[in-house]
Image (cartoon, helix red, strand yellow):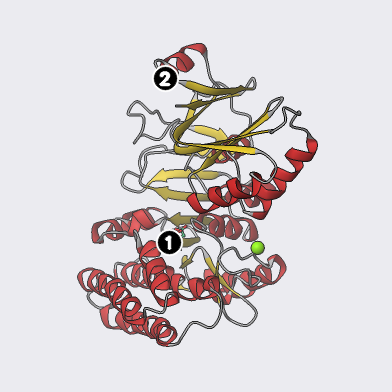
């Protein structure tokens, strides 16, 4: 048994959805659970719907939602022939659910509404993809994952109830796999014991797929992406980025930690626990080897480069030239926790404490304000943070040449530069 996950980019045009058919046909004799994300930028579009609704702009919310509806109806119209009417009927049921809610006035908190609306993106996309695959002979069973993935009610960051969900996977998914080779469902979403929809955090579909792989003891998980494999740098930033054919779980966790947009960091643990290999493959060219990620040690990795732009450095100095000690640092970390700030780099000196953060203006303002009660605070924006794992002298020289280095931190594995 295998688990496949198709991200939003792999289903964002008619041609791309059509491209799923040969991929599924290639594995026609396998049992496969397929997880599909919302199409393209649908999640972002639905976030705007929630924003408008929560701001009390009902008409605007309905108008924005109308655009999302039309996009999905148009896609299904072009894609489907025999299954169009059934697909349209199912889509319209989901549309109605959201519209009912949008006609109300917000009385609960934002995150609750976010999840009730945003979850629709994956329900729409899977309805269409399932109908299409059934029409072209890749017979599949569509399931509403909200009947399977039980979560707590920590909306927008829900935690899976592992025991309950595992039982449901056994009761619902396994029997379907006896009748169908493909079970197709959503990533990223779940439901509470009161049947309220929940989401697992942005980009959470990889994680859903990994949880399925774990619970089903799958042979492997394949994440289909619009890149040829995991690369040693973002090809949009570095045109000479190269493919990495093999990685181990730990390296992927490290890469994600430093900000590489490879795989959602939560994805690895459920796979690692059961030693399930993860393949990253290119959906537009499945014959490319892609990347395998597993438990084995991998030697001779190329330098792996992560460049984070728009970084903000906050420098905090003691007022009276007293050392920055555990009391200050403890206090600062307490503020990070309170404001949900995860610094990308910190450095403690005699009378100063530096931290480098992503540019979240509101949080930075609050942090600067609260810290200024006991330290002098200076904020510097527009910096970049360069991280190189498995570095060598040559790559360090090439990437920092002519740049103003504000800070350097180094271990035998990893070097980081804050560049001005
Ligand atoms: N559709 C969700 C998002 O865009 C989840 C996912 O694609 O992983 O964040
Ligand atoms: Mg939680």
Whether the residue carrying mark 1 lies under 8 Å from ligand 1 is answered with yes
Viewer-nearest residue: 260 or 294? 260
Above or below residue 413? Residue 383 is below
Dot 1: what SS?
A: loop
Viewer-nearest residue: 305 or 180? 305
Viewer-nearest residue: 384 or 305? 384
At x 25%, y 78%, the residue is 82
The image shows residue 260 at horizontal and vertical percentages of 49, 39
Screen quadrant of the C terminus: top left
- Residue 21 has which mark? none
The residue wearing badge 2 is: 403
Quadrant in the picture for residue 146:
bottom right
- Residue 140 seen in this snapshot: no
The image shows residue 21 at horizontal and vertical percentages of 32, 59
In the image: residue 179, left or right of residue 337? left
Above or below residue 262? Residue 418 is above
Above or below residue 47? Residue 241 is above
Q: How many marks?
A: 2
Quadrant in the picture for residue 126:
bottom left
- Residue 37 has which mark? 1
Screen quadrant of the N terminus: bottom right
Residue at the front extreme? 320
At x 41%, y 58%, the residue is 28
In the image: residue 67, left or right of residue 6? left
Q: Nearer the viewer, mark 1 or mark 2?
A: 2
């Amino acid at each position: 048994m295998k688990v496949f996950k198709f991200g939003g980019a792999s289903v964002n045009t008619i041609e791309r959805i059509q491209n799923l058919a040969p991929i599924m046909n290639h594995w026609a004799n396998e049992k496969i659970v397929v997880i599909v994300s919302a199409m393209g930028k649908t999640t972002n579009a639905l976030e705007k719907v929630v924003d408008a609704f929560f701001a009390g702009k009902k008409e605007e919310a309905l108008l924005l939602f109308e655009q999302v509806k039309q996009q999905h109806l148009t896609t299904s119209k072009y894609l489907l022939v025999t299954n169009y009417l059934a697909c349209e009927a199912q889509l319209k049921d989901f549309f109605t659910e959201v519209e009912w809610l949008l006609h109300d006035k917000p009385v609960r908190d934002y995150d609750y509404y976010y999840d009730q609306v945003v979850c629709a993106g994956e329900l729409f996309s899977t309805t269409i993809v399932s109908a299409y695959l059934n029409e072209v002979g890749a017979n599949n069973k569509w399931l509403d994952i909200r009947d399977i993935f039980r979560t707590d009610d920590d909306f927008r960051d829900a935690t899976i109830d592992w025991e309950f969900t595992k039982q449901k996977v056994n009761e619902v998914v396994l029997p379907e796999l006896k009748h169908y080779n493909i079970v197709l469902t959503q990533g990223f979403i779940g439901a509470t014991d009161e049947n309220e929809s929940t989401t697992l955090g942005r980009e959470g579909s990889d994680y859903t797929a990994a949880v399925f792989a774990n619970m089903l003891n799958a042979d492997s998980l394949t994440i289909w992406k619009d890149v040829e494999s995991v690369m040693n740098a973002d090809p949009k930033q570095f045109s000479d980025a190269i493919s990495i054919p093999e990685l181990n779980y730990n390296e992927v966790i490290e890469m994600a930690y430093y900000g590489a947009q490879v795989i959602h960091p939560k994805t690895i643990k459920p796979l690692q626990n059961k030693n399930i290999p993860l393949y990253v493959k290119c959906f537009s060219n499945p014959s490319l080897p892609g990347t395998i990620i597993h438990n084995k040690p991998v030697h001779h990795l190329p330098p792996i480069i992560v460049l984070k732009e728009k970084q903000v450095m906050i420098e905090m100095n003691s007022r009276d030239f007293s050392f920055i000690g555990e009391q200050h640092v403890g206090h600062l970390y307490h503020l990070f926790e309170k404001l949900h700030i995860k610094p990308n780099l910190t450095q403690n000196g005699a009378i100063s404490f530096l931290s480098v953060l992503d540019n979240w203006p509101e949080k930075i303002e609050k942090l600067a304000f609260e810290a200024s009660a006991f330290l002098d605070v200076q904020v510097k924006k527009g910096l970049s943070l360069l991280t190189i794992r498995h570095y060598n002298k040559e790559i360090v020289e090439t990437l920092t040449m002519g740049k103003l280095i504000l800070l350097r931190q180094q271990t035998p594995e990893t070097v980081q530069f804050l560049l001005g």
